Image (spheres, rainbow, N blue to C red):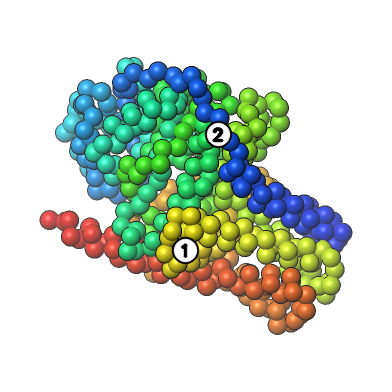
Amino acid sequence: MSALLLAAVFPTVGLIVCSAILLIQIALLVLRPIIAFMPARMTTNLRRIEKPHFSVHVATHAEPPHLVIRTLQALLDQDWPERDYEIIVMDNNTEDPSLWMPVKEFCDAWPYRITFLHQTGVEGAKAGALNIALEHTDPEATHIVTVDADYVVNPDFLTRASRALQRTGADFVQFPQSYIATTTAAPGVDAELDEYFRTNAAVADEAEAVLLTGTLCVISKPALVAAGGWSGSTTTEDAELGVRLCNAGFSGRFINQVVGRGLLPLSLNDLEKQRYRWCSGNFQTLLRHGASILTASGAFTLHKRLVILSQLTAWFNLALIPFVLLTVWMLTGRQDTAAVTIAAAAIVLSLCDITVRVVARGWRDRLALPVVLQALACRIALAPQSAKATFDGLIGSGLNFVVTDKSGAEGKGCCPLSLGHLLIFLSAVVMLVTVQPANPVILAALLVLMLPLLAASLTDQSLRNYRETIALQKTEVSP
């Protein structure tokens, strides 16, 4: 923070800071196509995997009971032999009995198939809950499966997991996250979220260094134990574990098959919270394991280092510092300096990165133009939160694990125009009107800064439509 204040007061320092940010942006922009063209070097001596015995772990905290029960029913309905898997529900720190007692009652009806655990005072959020579930795992279990409390898996999920393990010989595999009812409601939000799996995860598969994303992942129990179990040191315990597994020499593969669907965040506010956690948690992970990822101290090949770096920086946005410096300098009459131009260029490049990634994915997968534009609007709407999360991670701000609301209550009556979106928009308007810059780079940056507000409005409307669709489906299935 002191460095930012110093940069604002002394443009020379600011010029150095913004130039460094610009170079990092260019490096990350160039990194992804380089990785995409690197030849795959798959393990030739595949590990022989016998028929796995699964322990399915469902961590819950203050979840709507009907969602959890629906998830558990789908897990009970697997075409995998009952004797070859167990289900453990670990409810942590839920104070309201009306939320966890109905789940317990459902689990009690299946005493030989589901183990229900409820504990308070659990530390480490989801990681702490999963470690407790690990302690209660059947000794015969060979693989741990994590499923989020709102996911309905296909009947052949465990069968596909077994086939993936046997085909790849991997120590852990990750299936893509997918969402219910997005075909007609919020397809752009779905496409924006799916871009990570279509690009970062798919490319990381070729290096056998896919990071975990929290749900629909299958991990060898010996590998999980050898890596030290789950850690609550970051808010993305899944990605952090993935780095440790890879550094310990275990292989991870991405299995591009939809095997279950969950709920999208039901409001823009929830979506922003989720993106903030993903981005800041990955930054925490990068800082925690930076030495092993970026230097020779780690046990990674160059290919693995690059794909892990690409995955951890997938949600990064480095535009907050250039935005603050640009605003200060413009409003104090220093708009003609080189530092201002470099700051403006960093902001414009941030939009270029977003556009290239989203549009390239849409072109490659032949998505309809309206869906691509909606996905682009979603990524732009989330850019301020990504920028704040990146900055908070950089300065070491205290970060907490926040559970995404599944009830939709937080979205009712919620104004989509957050303080951040309004502040950015008004700042750009004030600079545009009062300063009237002639520099085309600065002018372009100010126009870029106006986009998140409009994009937020469009994305919020998509999520409102999605909420209505989910509510209608719930009404149709209710007795």
Q: Which secondary structure, mark 1? A: helix
Left or right: 15 as drawn, with respect to 140: right
Q: Residue sitting at 56 percent across and 23 percent down?
A: 248
Residue 135 on image: x %, y %: 39, 23
Quadrant position of residue 122: top left
| Res 145 label | none
Which amino acid is tagged 2? Ala
Marks counted in the figure total 2
Q: Residue sitting at 64 percent across and 44 percent down?
A: 34
Residue 95 on image: x %, y %: 35, 43
Q: Are marks 2 and 1 in contact (CB under 8 Å)?
A: no
Residue 455 on image: x %, y %: 51, 69
Evaluate whether residue 142 shows in this view. yes
Q: CA distance from mark 2 to mark 1?
A: 29 Å
Evaluate whether residue 244 shows in this view. no
Left or right: 240 as drawn, with respect to 478: right
Q: Is residue 211 above or below residue 469?
A: above
- Name the residue carrying label 1: 372
Q: Which secondary structure, mark 2? A: loop
| Res 40 label | 2
Say whether disc 2 or disc 1 marks the residue closer to the N-terminus: 2
Residue 114 on image: x %, y %: 24, 30
Which quadrant would the C terminus be assigned to in this image?
Answer: bottom left
Which amino acid is tagged 1? Val
